[in-house]
Image (tube, grey):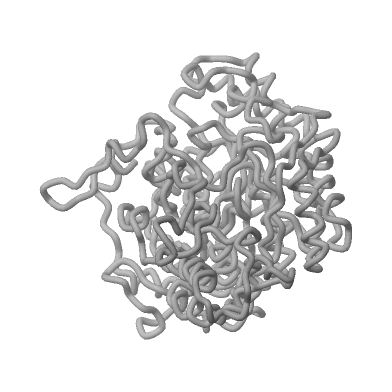
Amino acid sequence: MIPPSSEAPLDPLASAKPRPIIEIAARLGLTPDEIEPYGRIKAKLPLARIDLERAAKSKLILVSAVTPTPAGEGKTTTSIGLADGLSRLGKRAVAVLREPSLGPVFGMKGGATGGGRARLIPHADINLHFNGDFAAVEKAHNLLAAIVDNHLHSKKSALDLDPLTIRWKRVIDMNDRALRRIVIGMGGSGNGVPRETGFDITAASEVMAILCFAQSIADLKERLGNIFIGFSRSRRPVYARDLKVHGAMTALLREAMQPNLVQTLEGTPAILHGGPFGNIAQGTNSVVATRLGLSLADWVITEAGFGFDLGGEKFLDLKCRASGLWPDALVLVATIRALKYQGGVPVKELALPGADAIRRGFPNLARHLDNARFFGLRPVVVINRFAADHDDELALVRELCAKHEATVVASDHFARGGEGAMEAAAAVVAAAEASARTPKFAYPLDAPVEAKIEAIARGLYGAGDIALAAKAKTDLKTIAELGLSHLPICMAKTQYSFSEQASLLGRPEGFTLAVREIEIAAGAGFLIPICGDIMRMPGLPDAPAAEHIDLDEHGEVTGLT
């Protein structure tokens, strides 16, 4: 969790007075009859209000970041602060963000609703289960897994599935490393067919990715049917539609397909939907939520997970390519702490003064600036202020950014909310109004899969080469056999480095990016190169955040930072 940037109240939530959700909906031009309230301060939103002609006239602001420290750099906090700042400037603004996963909430990072005075409410509800979208994704995913194993067990199944080729795992919304590789079906023939499988975290589920890319219920059902399961013993590909389960999966997701409406502490509307991680999935909220935000407001602030090399690239190469969206402005969130960390300073010493470390770590920000410009975007660097930041350190970052012709603004939204973000919001408005939407992608879709991976690794990460493990090479043959070589790429790698090695800080050059395998997400519409030792099921730290979360005698959740 990002600590206070200056002397903010210890718990702004204690004095928060949420407005009725019908009032928040009214700020977006929605009537009480158009929303589906979940209690007094949450609601589901109607997809029928998506208006593509209206959406095309609104401004879309993408918030990404430098390579983060383990605690993160405050993209969500900054996104919320910017939305509040835009509202204070008289703009009709909305934040359109992802939903939190219970894995990080109970793991290392704690809650994911912002911090200080740049916060979403209801804080506890959003972090703990929210409106049930993650549960619906999990149930739909695991229904397919159960049907797969039922076909293996049934003597009447005509699919003749080969259990050794089945790629579909199960998911759970928890960090549980013990479930990465498991054996199921033990205990006799009545319990199914014994085979090796495993669990991914729900945020990495292809069903989650499909939910975020689907543009209608019909599109959702078709994409679910396109999920690749494995092969029959005669080497015929088997998809979810062959199991006749995609209709039931769609039924489970009918309410989850609707975006959720909440608010910031200052009453700015916020739309939350979907929750894929940026390091192991596409890292952005849903297409329908973004389009709905653009249909209902004039300014939309959205974010992409982790650094620009991950969530930012995927937002452009995956989400924008699939939907026709394109940002009018890009915000790169930077912190003095992150630059010091990239300069080799240990986490426990990041609060100490260190101009030399900032200079050593700045090439990391410079690479992100270069990558943004590769896509034709001119980023606004927003420095998320921390209490330990010194004025001379902020001045140094401004000086270094000026040499790269980058606009840079320090923002104090944590301590002062929208008021502290008004200067940054004004800079974003200026950037957006001066830009033209000219989409550019990192690679053409008709390039070979290996060439698309190389384009990202060499062009955006700074790699000198890529190395495909034997499993990855076998996967390439399967991808070609299935006719899926045209799909775009969703890289899965560590968020702590441009490389796949977390220890390679700063701006590494000439390294070899190791790709151990390539997963197929035919329903979502992309391929997932798994780089280095990244896991699609995270583990818990030695002292998980869950140890500090409790329910007090008044029924209030405590310890959820």
> Number of marks in the image?
0
Q: Nearer the viewer, residue 288 or 85?
A: 288
Left or right? Give the position of 388 relative to 125: right
The quarter of the image holding the N terminus is top left
| Quarter of the view holding residue 546 | top left
The quarter of the image holding the C terminus is top left
Left or right? Give the position of 208 relative to 368: left
Left or right? Give the position of 499 relative to 197: right
Left or right? Give the position of 278 relative to 489: left
Q: Residue furthest front?
A: 188
What residue is drawn where x is 79% and y is 46%? 456
What residue is drawn where x is 36% and y is 61%? 130
Q: Position of residue 556 (x, y in %)?
A: 19, 50
Question: Compared to 399, does 185 lie above or below?
Answer: below
What residue is drawn where x is 50% and y is 15%? 352
Q: Is residue 345 visible?
A: yes
Q: Residue furthest left?
A: 553
| Quarter of the view holding residue 27 | bottom left
Q: Nearer the viewer, residue 390 or 343?
A: 343
What residue is drawn where x is 36% and y is 53%? 127
Q: Nearer the viewer, residue 512 or 374?
A: 512
Q: Is residue 49 visible?
A: no
Q: Position of residue 541 (x, y in %)?
A: 42, 33
Q: Position of residue 64 (x, y in %)?
A: 62, 46
